Amino acid sequence: MIEVIELTVNGDRHRIGVPSHYTLLETLRYVLGYTGSKQGCDKGDCGSCTVLVDGVPTLSCILPVQEAVGHEVTTVEGLAGPDGPHALQDAFDICGAAQCGFCTPGVLIAAASLLRQTESPSRQEIKTALSGNLCRCTGYTKIYEAVELAARAAREGRKPSELVQR
Amino acid sequence: MKLEDLRDKQKERAASDEELRQALEREFQVIGRRLRRTDGLSKSTGRTVYTDDIVLPGMLHGKILRSPHPHAHIKSIDASRALALDGVHAVITGSDMPVPYGILPWTRDEHALCVDKVRYVGDGVAAVAAVDEETANRALELIEVEYEAVRHYLDPKEALADPETPIHEPHKPGENGNVSKRVHLEFGDVDRLMEGSEVVVESEYYFEGTTHTAIEPHCAIGYYDASGKLTVWSATQVPHYLHRELARVLDLDVARVRVIQPAVGGAFGGKSEPFDLEFCVAKLSMATGRPVKILYTREEVFYAHRGRHPMLMRYRTGADRSGRIKAVDASTVMDGGAYSSFGLVTTYYSGQLVTMPYAMESYRFDSTRVYTNKPCCGPKRGHGSVQPRFAIEVQLDRLAEALGVDPIELRRINSLGSDTRSVNEFRVTSNGFLECLEAVEAASDWTNKYRRLPYGRGVGVAGSCYISGTNYPIYPNEMPQSAVQLQVDRSGRVTVFCGASEIGQGSDSALAYIVAEELGVPLDYIRVLSADTDLTPVDLGAYSSRETFMCGNACIAAARQIKEQVRQAVGEAWGCRSKQVALAGGWAFDVRDTGQRLPISEAFNLAEARFGTLGAVGCYNTPKDIHGDYRGGTIGSSPAYSFTAHVVELAVDPETGFVEVEKIWIAHDCGRALNPILVEGQMEGSAYMGFAEAILEEHIFKESGLHNAPSLLDYKIPTSLDTPEMESLIVESLDPEGPYGAKEAGEGPLHPSIPAIANAIYDAVGVRPDRLPFSPPRVWTAIQARRVREEAGELVLWKREPRETALPVTGD
Amino acid sequence: MLRLHPYRYHRPRELAGALELLKVHAGNVMPIAGGTDLMPNMKHRLFTPGHLVSLKGVEGLYGIEERDGEIWIGACESLTSVASAPLVKRYYPSLAFAASTIANPMIRNQGTIGGNLCLDTRCTYYNQTHFWRQALGFCLKRDGDVCHVVKGGTRCVAAHSADTPPVLITLGASADLASTEGTRTIGVEEFFTADGVWNTARKPHEVVTRVRLPKPPAGLRTSYQKLRERKSVDFPILSVALAVAMADTDTVASISLVVSGLGAKPRTIGQLDDIAAGRQLDAGIIEAVAEQAYRQCHPLANIIVDSDWRRAMVRVYVRRAFRDIQSKSEAAA
Ligand SMILES: Cc1cc2nc3c(=O)[nH]c(=O)nc-3n(C[C@H](O)[C@H](O)[C@H](O)COP(=O)(O)OP(=O)(O)OC[C@H]3O[C@@H](n4cnc5c(N)ncnc54)[C@H](O)[C@@H]3O)c2cc1C
Ligand code: SF4
Ligand code: FES
Ligand code: FES
């Protein structure tokens, strides 16, 4: 059955018809073309599909799309603004925190939510916040460094690139 | 806008006078600096396009029907009901693609879809293309396959003992069809030297299978267009080999086949040969005239596998009283799964790659790869040598203990050194192993910790060596292993075309750094277009740690030609010798007077006016005479070798058997770090992956031949909270043949993690876990067994005084 | 991808509407809260209802508040809220802790306490894809008639694997159930049955509306210990919830100990008061309690983990629970 729903993604309201048994991830990727959110396991085990729903990190592969109706969905594409990439996105690039980049969108969303709640997260807090996002490439170290760099940049009101000596 | 205005924009971004003067003092401007990747921002902003992100007009979706039996003959397949289903466009079966394939031309024993027999649960038997995935799934349920199940083998021992229902036809009549490959090589007189050894240690080790678990599942799209040209987009790490095999299996003119590798979401060896989905999307597109996509489910990724071979290894190691290794005798049974894959190479690697970094007087190995009815094993990061490395390094720990020598010292004593040959006659040039040992020894405060930490805590060390590419391609030919083409635009933009596979390791970035170094253009003037067989010259792919070394060298060769042209043209314009012209920081400038300079684009324009359109090709081929002259001597020989040492510190909870790896110090000789960030990333990623195999992962099967747990919930890869702290210590030995001296960093640093953890567990609680993974039940059982023997007075109380017999307990 | 079967998704605003839908579509409908258990299970075709009734939009199912000397937790409160709510942390730290160990941060945001209570049992032969289960031969929990864990067994022994119920039992909690027929309250301990196929007393058309916890007696000491392979994501493969009521600072009044993750029902360890009531909490008592738990627990091969080890860990984890409450009370003193 096709259902007509209104979905707000990265600030844009979309009126779309979707099969009623679609997940938010299927809708984002295959109906709306927001391919930034990835699918690694499709059943809640890996975190690559993480998006924000009303600011809360959520696994879109196990969220019925109807549950996103009436809420604000933010994907990795929505983190960057007209002024350029989000500090975290820039920090990930600077620190080499994205290798294959497949886990990256989900990791960034989880990290963005952490930084909204905590100005100076400790290593342990970062680890805990990212403990649902499996990364197979980095061994996580560079990811922590990137989150710490972005947090520092935000605290000091500067750009991550201004804080590193090259 | 006038040309002048365009250049002003470039001058703003180019280096200042002061910076140019500084540049003259440095050997490199780009190489060795902590730079961004070329693809970092596009990845972090979610813009990078992976195969499943591609949607083509009119695209159909395919699915593959898989065998529920581990070993069975296919009696019949009836797809008529599936074909009748609304929305189904085509169904294909094995008979549509009867040509067998295999990554190695000597062992082509697979079919795109099984023809008459299935050999593991998950083997593909038919494929469907339909309007959407759900319809394709329904269609699969309507395909009727009649099987006749036959006896299946899960244990290599049984497959060896009973060749009655062989998994494959024997190579020769009378041989056991369950034997995939056997290699026996001996260097020096092992029996005599073992006999004469003052200390001999012997043990059996078991390495459980593990799998790559890249987070991106395999995905491919095929499109056979109206003109009869086939294009396949695939998450592969070997586009060139895929290109060839597609043409062969589908009986197409290879010049009318194109393979494009979009961004790949991790591979680790798990995407380094053709898979059924690539043939199926192509064939289904040929059948329908429409683009067809197949995306594996996570479960299918586990069936595709090609991961680490389970190995049962028996090792004897003999040494003299000073600790010098006199003889190593290894015999190994490898569980290959249902097909050959790279198995022939793996069988050699299991013996050939472990002689270094040590000097040994004699060495013998006997490895047998056996077929079983399980998903096929193949190359996983550290192909073939991670398992025996575990055995060999624990043997050394045993030896050190028997001799009362510090294990780091023992490794030092046996270090092979540079510019020499290994016992199996591989030529070694640069070798930074001793520096690696020193680095981890110092950083970890080893001397104050080894055997001195309280019961339950321990440190362990291990070393290793790995190849930087292989001297021989996997199909015999004399052509270069890697090639690069450069194209220069009047704007100063340079495009690098190369067949190399960027799989997250940063090979695109490495190419960009090299061009930026040679031509002096800013990094963001460089575009890297890689892995598209229509556009890029051949590179053999991302395996055996070959990319940086080989395409790096090819890229230097190409860039230097353009560099010379530019310097000559500018020199002529300035009336000076071309040697006096340097290219750096976005300028061509006079090394004697940095004030005399031109924006790099202007310099390029001069050269273009002088020589015609600027472009160059460069290639690299390996030296071929740097191994022993014996059958198999070519396999495992490499133009250069990387070296690694790890120290691990951990805590074992004796009550539960949990091993908490707290820190890994990783020292790795990568030759030269082109970008230390990328090298560290490879070191950390490798050490993490080794740690995971040591503690958590097991690719195991139920009696019925079903995969135990084909999901990311049940196949345990570490979360952030499980992963130890890691400290990367880069050692640069500057290889004479590597690009700027670089070797590899992607695979070598995985090896020592596992034996270093095993050795640290021994230091902590006095038990040797000789079977992987070192899961809590195993470690706990071993601790219990030791306690019984301690209480019986057979063993001393490990690191405890008699009065402390009650086990101290660490927190949870 | 793992595509879902077609279904209709209902989002009632009122509880009455939800209950009505469950009645109207009886036999072909399931409630869904966070969906973190049900969605993966549906992707594995373990459930294929034609209708889903979402509880997330039902207003009355929220709130963590003090009522009539009890603490009420609305069934749709997320695990994140339960783990961080000041009331829960103050009165029931072991519950907050248990909730904080569930799955991963995202799943705790999505998953609910009601769903945790109603979590389907788990088994290595059951939580697999349709292809996998078909290849092996279906089992009696779904689509088949044999048990692969207990050969020849006629009862499903899939494991209760939720983290909060064992704690809720030690805290004397109960659950409110509602259906078109009315409402009832049932103790969480009685809520569970030993049948792995459907291990709760909840009827399919009933909805858990809230969890109710009595105010803890003064000096109640609690602990929750979870054994799992990884430090995040994983379900418990053994869990121990402990609550010790003290008669005075040193003397035990009563002990409530629940061990779970082994069989279909969280196991309340019996005969502890004989061992401990009126005695001082010393090493001897702790060992005796651990021994009692060990004797009463018999892990089965419903997960692929060495059963002997899992059983030995019962003792260890019970000891750890005691050690935990001891160190907490030392810290408090
Ligand atoms: C990767 C992963 C790891 C996990 N790890 C853990 C873990 O460590 N510990 C743990 O306890 N759980 C774990 N879970 C399971 C699950 O996330 C939690 O148990 C969660 O609390 C379930 O709540 P939910 O609201 O999402 O339930 P749902 O999926 O919505 O529902 C679960 C079941 O309960 C029924 N139901 C839900 N709410 C009600 C209600 N109010 N009244 C009646 N019936 C209802 C549904 O019909 C369904 O049958 C994990 C899940 C995943 C995917
Ligand atoms: S315990 Fe037996 S019946 Fe229950 S799910 Fe497991 S195999 Fe099936
Ligand atoms: S794809 Fe959603 S958690 Fe893996
Ligand atoms: S960067 Fe590849 S999975 Fe994280």
Image: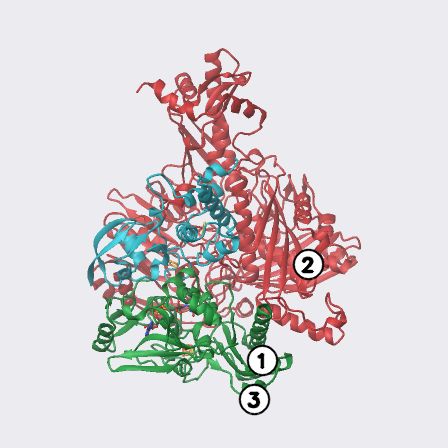
Where residue B17 appears, x then y in whole percent?
A: 50, 21
Q: Who is closer to the viewer here, B294 or B777?
A: B777
Marked residue chain, label 1: C
Percent position (x, y) of residue B551? 49, 37
Chain for numbered disc 2: B
Of residue C313 and residue B113, the one placed in the foreground of this image is: C313
Residue under circle 2?
B395
Instruction: Give above or below for B230 relative to C323.
Output: above
How crowded pointer 1 is (Cα within 10 Å; few <14, some 14-19, many 20+) is rated as many
Pointer 3: what residue?
C274
Q: Quadrant of residue B471?
A: top right
Q: What is the secondary structure assignment of the residue under circle 3?
A: helix
The residue positioned farthest toward the top in the image shown: B575
Instruction: Report the disc number at residue B672.
Output: none
Residue type at tag 2 = Gln
Circles 2 and 3 on the same subunit: no
Occupied quadrant, residue B499: top left
Position of B380 compared to B671: left or right? left
Quadrant observed for ligand 2 in the rendered image: bottom left
**Residues at marks 2 and 1, CA–CA distance in whole angstroms:** 40 Å
Badge 1 or badge 3: first in the primary sequence: 3
Give me the chain that's red.
B
Report the chain holding disc 3. C
In the picture, the disc for residue C290 is: 1
Looking at the rendered image, the disc whose residue lies closer to the viewer, 1 or 3, is: 3
The answer to whether residue C140 is seen in the rendering is no
Spatial separation of the CA atoms under disc 1 and disc 3: 14 Å
Q: Amino acid at mark 3?
A: Asp
Look at the image and tell me whether residue B4 can be seen: yes
Q: Which chain is cyan?
A: A
Q: Position of residue B534 (x, y in %)?
A: 36, 38
**Quick one: label 2, few (<14), some, or many (20+) residues within 10 Å?**
many
